[in-house]
Image (tube, rainbow, N blue to C red):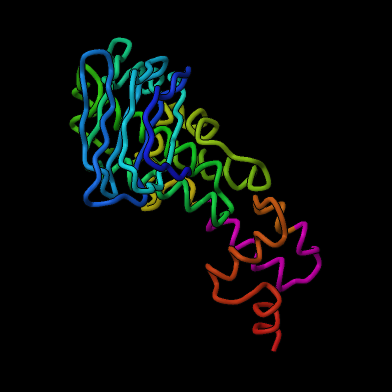
Amino acid sequence: MRAHAGTEGPGYNGEQIEIVFLLEGVRDGRATCKFGSREHPVPTHTGTAWVCPAEVRADEIRTTRSPLMAGHIYIPQSSLDAVASDEAVACRKPVLRSAATPRDTMIDYFGRTVLAEMERETSAGRLLADAAVTMLSAHLLQNYAEFTPASIARDQRRPLDPSRLSRVVAHIEHHLDDDISLASLARVACMSAFHFSRSFAAAIGVPPHRYVSQLRLERAKSEIVAGKVPLAEIALRSGFSSQSAFTRAFRRRVGLSPGEYRRSLRG
């Protein structure tokens, strides 16, 4: 997240795709991104988004003098290529367009979701970030590529079959202490990360990161009541970077601190 005052100069030039979305804009402002002879003028209100392909540089960026608060998301080109090469998508190497849009609800949603995770750590942040990158890659393919893969446009979501679902759930339960990634779960299901994420949610009713987070919370509750495992260890096993981060997250979910929760059940 960055604060931008009025500015004029070259844009980002890197190996990753850059997505910029305005968290706090101004109604009377304007911004213009220039790529070669093409200019993309957009209003600078909240929700405005820019997409800059990997290794493409904006020749000039002009923004309002009013302060703007923007989120910057960087997506590896390999993530886009992985979704494009999925056998269910089966399309050639994707080519993104440089674009600016006054409103993209999908970018705004995932951007704010990732930002919330950074500000308020949860027990399944790795899975959430993986899912955000995967779904944003699919969104870019559908809306900002030179073509739209038909299978993504149809957005078919078939639930995981019972056999695959059983394998994935068993894997999660066995590795609940580990840093579980979306790619590792997709491999267990023998699917791409893109289609696994949607199929899992269709079968369970919640995305993978929420399912893992709920399992870790229920285990943490049991361990807190038993009182045999130090709180710091429970925090680390639950996927948190510190005991304080775990305590804050626990209070948000349960409404009580770990100590208060233990006392409430012990009477």
What secondary structure predominates along the stretch shown in magenta?
A: helix
Residue at the (55%, 36%) spot, across then down: 181
- How far from the left and from the top, in percent, is residue 232? 77, 59
Left or right of 186 on screen, residue 157: left
- How far from the left and from the top, in percent, is residue 217? 59, 61
Viewer-closest of 192 and 116: 116
Query: Residue 56: within the magenta?
Result: no
Magenta part of the protein: which range?
Answer: 212-233
Can residue 202 be seen? Answer: no
Can residue 251 be seen? Answer: yes
In the figure, residue 40 lies in which quadrant?
Answer: top left
On screen, residue 143 above or below 199: above
On screen, residue 24 above or below 163: below
Viewer-closest of 147 and 155: 147
On screen, residue 164 above or below 260: above
Q: Residue furthest top?
A: 92
